[in-house]
Image: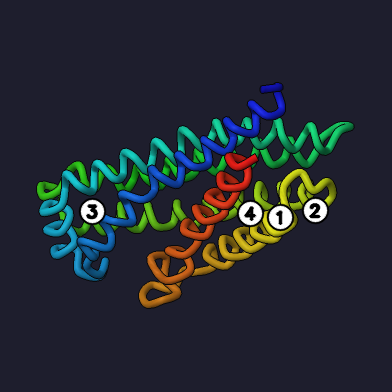
């Protein structure tokens, strides 16, 4: 196996691991629906009741999004820069923004983890504020995410280093994330915990799964 093939396998495996580490969180959310944030007392009781499952799924999510995603960023840079040639400016942009995305997701998960860790002793009002901080930190991940996926899309479109539909998917991920960042209503579907902010990480996960499928089958 040559260096290029090895890089592709590592990148595909990293993308797959991020997806796999995301799945427990999706399962916990489906099994134990979160109460409205407008009811802080119920929220703290919910976090205390499911503390172990929530902490475990948050740990795995952090391992995937803040750890393995950095490995994926390195592999993606190697692929894109090799295909782009020259100065490789868009490859560098994609790498830097992907690392920034990993860091930003880690910040959001830290706020969320503190609330879970301190339940049920934490004051309900403080828990509500920290949950809002986690939600807004999650919204802010949209900007570096959009930059890295759009930069990747530019290289893919120009070089076909990955199938063109993967590039189209990258643009869709960027659009969903930028839309989610505008969801700042206090309540309802357009709030930080509404539809688009929930859909954005799922879109990113699906895109990574697509990349893993392409690379690991080569």
Of label 4 and label 2, which has the lower sequence position? 4
Of label 3 and label 2, which has the lower sequence position? 3
Kindly identify which residue carries mark 4. Answer: 146
Q: Is residue 171 above or below residue 118?
A: below
The circle on residue 157 is: 2
Instruction: Check disc 2: other Cα within 10 Å, few if <14, some if 14-19, many if 20+.
Output: some
Residue under the point 65% across and 56% down: 170
Quadrant housing residue 167: bottom right
CB atoms of marks 1 and 2 within 8 Å = yes
The circle on residue 167 is: 1
Residue under the point 31% across and 49% down: 24
Of label 3 and label 4, which has the lower sequence position? 3
Disc 1, SS:
helix
Kindly identify which residue carries mark 3. Answer: 126
The residue lying toward the viewer, choosing from 103 and 159, is 159
In 3D space, how far apart are the residues under numbered discs 4 and 2 (Cα atoms)?
16 Å
Callout in the foreground (3, 2):
2
In 3D space, how far apart are the residues under numbered discs 3 and 1 (Cα atoms)?
42 Å
CB atoms of marks 3 and 2 within 8 Å = no
In 3D space, how far apart are the residues under numbered discs 3 and 2 (Cα atoms)?
47 Å
Return the x and y of residue 184 as percentages of the image width and height. 46, 68
Residue under the point 71% across and 22% down: 2
């Amino acid at each position: 196996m040559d260096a290029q093939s090895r890089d592709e396998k590592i990148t595909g495996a990293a993308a797959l691991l991020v997806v796999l580490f995301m799945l427990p969180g999706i399962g916990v959310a489906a099994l134990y629906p979160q109460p409205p944030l407008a009811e802080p007392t119920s929220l703290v009781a919910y976090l205390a009741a499911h503390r172990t499952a929530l902490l475990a799924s948050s740990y795995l999510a952090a391992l995937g999004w803040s750890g393995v995603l950095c490995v994926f960023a390195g592999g993606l840079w190697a692929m894109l820069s090799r295909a782009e040639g020259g100065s490789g400016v868009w490859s560098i942009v994609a790498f830097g923004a992907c690392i920034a995305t990993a860091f930003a997701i880690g910040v959001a998960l830290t706020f969320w983890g503190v609330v879970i860790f301190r339940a049920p002793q934490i004051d309900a009002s403080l828990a509500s504020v920290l949950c809002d901080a986690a939600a807004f930190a999650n919204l802010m991940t949209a900007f570096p995410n959009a930059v890295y996926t759009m930069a990747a899309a530019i290289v893919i479109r120009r070089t076909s280093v990955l199938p063109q539909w993967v590039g189209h998917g990258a643009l869709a991920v960027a659009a969903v994330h930028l839309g989610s960042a505008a969801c700042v209503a206090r309540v309802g579907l357009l709030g930080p915990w509404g539809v688009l902010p929930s859909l954005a990480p799922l879109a990113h996960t699906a895109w990574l799964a697509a990349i893993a499928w392409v690379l690991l089958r080569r």
